[in-house]
Amino acid sequence: MAEIATIARPYAEALFKAAGANTAGLLQEIGALSAVSADPALQQFADNPKVEGATVFNVLSDVLGRQGVVLSQAAQNFLKTVLDNGRLAALPEIAQQFQALVNARSGVSDATVESAFPIDAAALAAVVATLETRFGRKLNPTVIVKPELIGGIRVVVGDEVLDTSVAARLQQMRAALTA
């Protein structure tokens, strides 16, 4: 079976082309769809050969409606296409790839900032400003608290990693002492 990223790529690219200038609104809708479609019970329901795509579409629309998300016509058409082709399981990956395409167009990259402690808004703004200089592009940060880092931060931007955590420094010292 093909890897999920390979399956998702054409859908993400088609959605990106169809979105045109409305990528921001569509991005939120696809993100909500992705979150709901990742539910294992919904996946099992959608994979049932006795359940039609229209039924799954109605269930998804109802769940999103209860969350206050109303799908635009473009998102509805996209969802119907995904369901007709039996690719609901690929929706989270499609959303990620769509996000990457939108970011690439706008010159923004997603950054995962892992910290041993919660970071307040002012400190995060200062850290992001420094990181934007370091990585040479605008960043969209997501903060994850990981106490096992002991102190410092670990930043992941695409395939680049900047690890200034105490845990990483201890690991480096351990490697140097055992070499």
Image (cartoon, grey):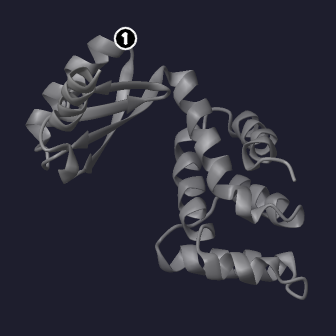
At x 38%, y 26%, the residue is: 161
142 or 171, which lies in front? 171
Q: Which quarter of the picture shows residue 71?
A: bottom right
Left or right, 66 with respect to 115, comes to: right
What is the total number of numbered labels drawn onto the structure image? 1
* Rendered view: 57 above or below 165: below
* Rendered view: 133 above or below 126: above
Left or right, 133 with respect to 46, comes to: left
Q: Which residue is under mark 1?
A: 136
At x 10%, y 44%, the residue is: 120
* Rendered view: 2 above or below 107: below
At x 48%, y 28%, the residue is: 158
Q: Residue furthest bottom?
A: 50
Q: Secondary structure at mark 1?
A: loop
Quadrant assignment for the C terminus: top left
At x 30%, y 18%, the residue is: 132
* Rendered view: 119 above or below 68: above
> Would you call the spot at circle 1 few (<14 residues within 10 Å), some (14-19), or many (20 or more)?
few
- Measured as percent of width and height from the top left, residue 74 is found at 72, 52
Q: Which quarter of the picture shows residue 153?
A: top left
Q: Which quarter of the picture shows residue 155?
A: top left
Which residue type carries mark 1? Gly
38 or 28, which lies in front? 38
- Measured as percent of width and height from the top left, residue 29 is found at 57, 56
- Measured as percent of width and height from the top left, residue 73 is found at 71, 58
